Image (cartoon, rainbow, N blue to C red):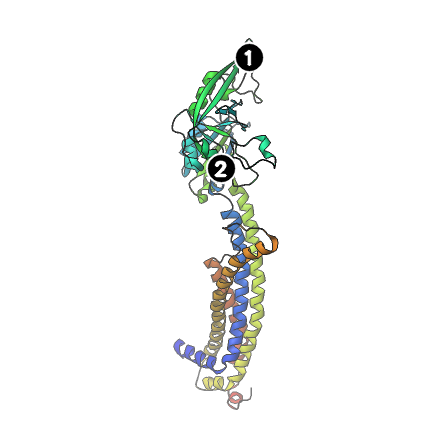
Amino acid sequence: MTFRDQLRFVRQNVKKNKTRLFMTVLATAMGCAFLIVLASVGFGLQKSIVDDMVGDRLVTEIEVWGVMPEGEEKVNNDLRDEHISYLKSVEHVKAVTTRNRVRQSLEPTVDGTVLTTFGAIAVDFDEESKAGMELDAGRFPQATNEIVVGYHIRKTDQQDQPQYDEVPPAKEWLGKTVRLTVKQRSADGGETSTPIEAAIVGVTKKPSKEWEEDRLLYIGSGMLDEVERITQTRLGEIREAGGNSGAPRDLAADLSQPRTYESVKVVADRLDHVKSIASEIRSKGYLNHSIVDMLEQTNLFFLIMKIGLVFVGTIAVLIASIGIFNTMTMAVTERAQDIGIMKAIGAHPSVIRRIFLLESAVIGLSGAVIGTIVSYGLSHAVNWGLPVLVKMVMDEKVPDNFVFSLIPPYLVMIACAISLGVAVLSGMRPAARATRVDVLRALRRDV
């Protein structure tokens, strides 16, 4: 008997009892759909929490906080230009951002209004632009006397009180001139003040977290050079009376020593290159940390969660296997005469076994296909209905891109494989029983 003949025989037998077969396939489909939808919750939450809710730059950032040269036991936290040059040369590095806080207030004013800032930060705007720094309005500075201000730069400490109206937008100050005052003490204790003027050309994007405020002034390396030229100290540090440095880490009190960077971050061009970059620079002695280190633990948690959900969903498929076993057992009983005839004309027991296993596989595969279609419909319904339900019941708005249920293609393949495997296993015992049917008793319809 050829394989085509076996399929034809299975199709004829399936048509004999459509109601029982339909109910068996339906139970299998329900179990398969339950498995897929249940596991899809794990995939959806992982995507929302790990992929969507974490910004691209944050994911691809590697924070470098020191270097320990080979053969040395002490960490050098003073990263300099030669270190930055090496980091930029590493393959798949998109940008290397550096930041230094100016060590005096600069007393910024705009149109005579004193700004309540969180200080001034010196950055490399070219590298920040490559890294993905976003602006709410304006552009990045192109000249030494141009700066970018924080989104909340116009907010004052008094405006934290509830009686104040909303703070005017910072973009209204684009093109205005901010006056900075650079101070320094002389050796005899006298103090000098030197004014610097800069044009506001950009405003940073509003922080994603509601409680965060950006009241910083962002200046370029050229303006930092000008501040250091005036103070004759690194980062514009004000000397104490008598000329001693008041820096907490006793950084260079004059310009004779090279500039060091307080914050250095390497930005990879793609997420899947972060780990390789971190490993490479770590092998050169650069101590670093990235969110990928934390994501590995988070992904491990979600992996365990998804395995657990698949396991629970598999139980539903196993319950459906009881129906498959019952259906196939009934099929062997009802087709005893057909089995006897096949044996009488010389059919091998393996052929008879294969016919019943094939019928079990058809039931499992049919249930998997129907269950997959149903699960996609349920997944779309969950993603559409749950945000509405959360809004109605809890009066909370779910983020626009939040995904509760996600069905990747390999989850469908896993579910179909489980459904097909369980169906075949359920049909093995009835198929084995079919091979043991006695020919004479079968032809007398007595099994």
Task: Please report the residue visible at 52 percent of the width from the left and 84 percent of the height from the top.
Answer: 334
Local crowd size for mark 1, using a 10 Å CA cut-off: few (<14), some (14–19), many (≥20): some
- Looking at the rendered image, the quarter that the C terminus falls into is bottom right
* Three-letter residue code for mark 1: Gly
- Kind of residue at badge 2: Ile
| Residue sitting at the far top | 188
170 versus 301 height, above or below: above
Q: Secondary structure at mark 1?
A: loop
- The residue lying toward the viewer, choosing from 342 and 392, is 392
Q: Foreground residue, 13 or 43?
A: 43
Residue at screen point 57% across, 61% down: 311
Work out whether 317 lies above or below 188.
below
Residue 217 percent location from the top left of the image = 49, 28
Secondary structure at numbered mark 2: strand
The residue at which mark 2 appears reads as: 62
Q: Which residue is mark 1?
A: 243
In the foreground, 316 or 204: 204
Q: Residue at x 53, y 35 (%)?
A: 167
